[in-house]
Structure formats: structure tokens, C-alpha cells
Image: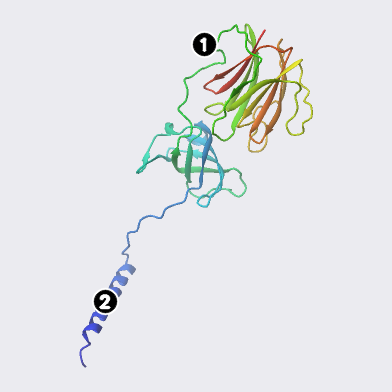
Amino acid sequence: MRPAPPVRQAFLRTALLSGLLGALAGCGATRQEPPPKEMPDIRGVITSLAHGGKDGAAATLRIAGSKQADTRYDRAVVTLTAATRIYQREPDGRSLVPLESLRLGDKVEVRFAGPVPGSSESYPVQAQAAEVLILVHLAGAAPPAVEKDEVGDAYPAQFAGTREPQEKEPPDRLPLTLRAVRTGPQEHFDRVVFEFDADTVPGYRVEYIAQPTHCGSGLPAQVGGKSWLQVRFHPAQAHNEEGGSTVGTLQKRTGLRIVQEIQEVCDFEGEVTWIIGLDGRRGYRVLDLANPPRVVVDVPR
């Protein structure tokens, strides 16, 4: 038999080597490849942040975003545990950070830990987080604490107030949730407090109006009093995911001398409006308080 030509010999050697490598692979040899890039389950803004929880949870986040090509969900209630890793995006990658780095209003990406139980029946989806990546802090650091509705020397107990409209520009945020409305007498004035489940207050406009109306129908709203202060918040909401009120009651007789009744007349498309019924047109003042964020309306006696 004649020897194979050199080209054929080279081909045979290559085939033999390939067969040998294949055999080794079948005996347990592995190829080292970079891990696949896993898509985040949700990308959005933290609208609620509560530390602690059931079964040893470190924190619970509510996240609102939009369904995108590389995400699976647009709303989620996410539980963080001791095993959850939290990262901060950096110019050259990401760095591990503590839980305290998370703030209300942060834009984040979350990858869930394992399959989501009952995801087809639950909205927003409820899941446990394997990783949270902070993309950007949309809100500043928390302001100094003010523990109670009472305020110090910076806000005198006796004041004349104004009858002109009072406004604050809205923040660039998703709607902030109104969680409590309360009234109370002070030594020289009556007070109405609007408390928000967030790290800041929404924008607002407070002004006297001729007649209260409901925002959807435009029908008159029956609010006790002779004069009416309208308090409009934006962006804001006063309902939960199921449509129930987060405030509890939408109308209240106060038993106060000046502020006689308060009533919600609008909670629609990022706007919440309350009416304060007064015994007559008076000066008033508006204060922003912190920790928790509150908008306060004071009317002197």
C-alpha cells in the first residue's frame, strides 16, 4: 500500500485529534464559558420602602416601572433577605453596598430569586430578590428630622397668614401616596395635616375657591363651612393597587371652631384634592414638615 499524500496525512492527523478531544469531552472534560447575562425581572422606581417584615425579611420594596423588552414585569412587591445582594452602579461596573443605601425614589433593577410563585394570579407580582442594582438616586438625602406636627420657633404660634394662593413645584417622581389626613386644635390656630408615604411631599396648590366640586363629574361637593380652601397635590394618589383608600375616610367633621369639615373630592390621574371648609375667609399658612413628609395648613383663630 502506498503511503498517503502529505495533505491527506495532515487531514488524518486533524481528524484523529478532533476525535480524541471529543472522546475526552465525553469523559467529563468541560469548556470554560462566561456565565450568560441574566435579564432583570423588573426595572423601575422604588415607591415604598419598609424595613423589616415577616419571616426575618430585611425590607420590602414596592417598585413601579414599565414592561420593557428586557424585563418581565412592570409592578412588583419585592422582599429583601439577608441573602439579597445590593449593588450601586459605578462608571466602570458596580459595587456592593449596604441595605441603607436604598432610598425611596431610587431607580433600580431587580433580579428575583428563583421562580415567582403564583405570578399569573398576583398583581403586582410578589417575589424575593436575589439582587438589587441601584441605577440612580432620583431623590436627595433625607432632610433633618422633625418628630411631631408641633413646630418650633421657626414657625410662630401667632401669625396673620395670607389669603393668596400658595404653590410648590412638583418633583419629577411617580405619584406619592397620601397615607393620612388629620386635624387638630393648637393654641392659636386650627391645623390640617396631610402625611405622605414617601421621602418628600408632592407639589401642591392651596387656594380659596367659590364652590367645591368633584373632579370627575364636576358636580358640587357638599362640604360644611362658609369658605373653602382647596388643597391640590400632584403627583399624588390616595389609593392602593386594589383601588382602596389609603387614607381611611374621605370626609370628616372636625369639631373644631375654624376648620369645620374636610373632604376628598379628587383622586384621579396623579392628582389628589381635598377641601377644607372654614367658618369664614381668613389668612392661612402652609408648611412642609419632614420625617414623615407632611404638608400642613394652619388657619389662625
Q: Is residue 36 above or below residue 76?
A: below
In front: 203, or 105?
203
Across and down, in percent, residue 274 comes to 68, 24
In front: 299, or 262?
299
Residue at point 36% right, 40% down? 95
Element at label 1: loop
Residue type, numbered disc 1: Ala
Across and down, in percent, residue 291 comes to 52, 22
Tags 1 and 2 in contact by the CB under 8 Å rule? Answer: no
Q: Is residue 88 above or below residue 12?
A: above
Residue at which label 1 appears: 154
Upstream in sequence: badge 1 or badge 2 = 2
Across and down, in percent, residue 40 comes to 48, 48
The residue carrying pointer 2 sits among few (fewer than 14), some (14 to 19) or many (20 or more) residues within 10 Å by Cα, namely few
Left or right of 140, for residue 284? right
Residue type, numbered disc 2: Thr
Residue 14, disc: 2
In front: 264, or 33?
264
Q: Outermost residue, bottom direction?
A: 1
- How many angstroms separate mark 1 from mark 2 (CA)? 87 Å
Q: Which one is in front in this view, the residue at disc 1 or the one at disc 2?
A: 1
Element at label 2: helix
Q: Which quadrant is home to the C terminus?
A: top right
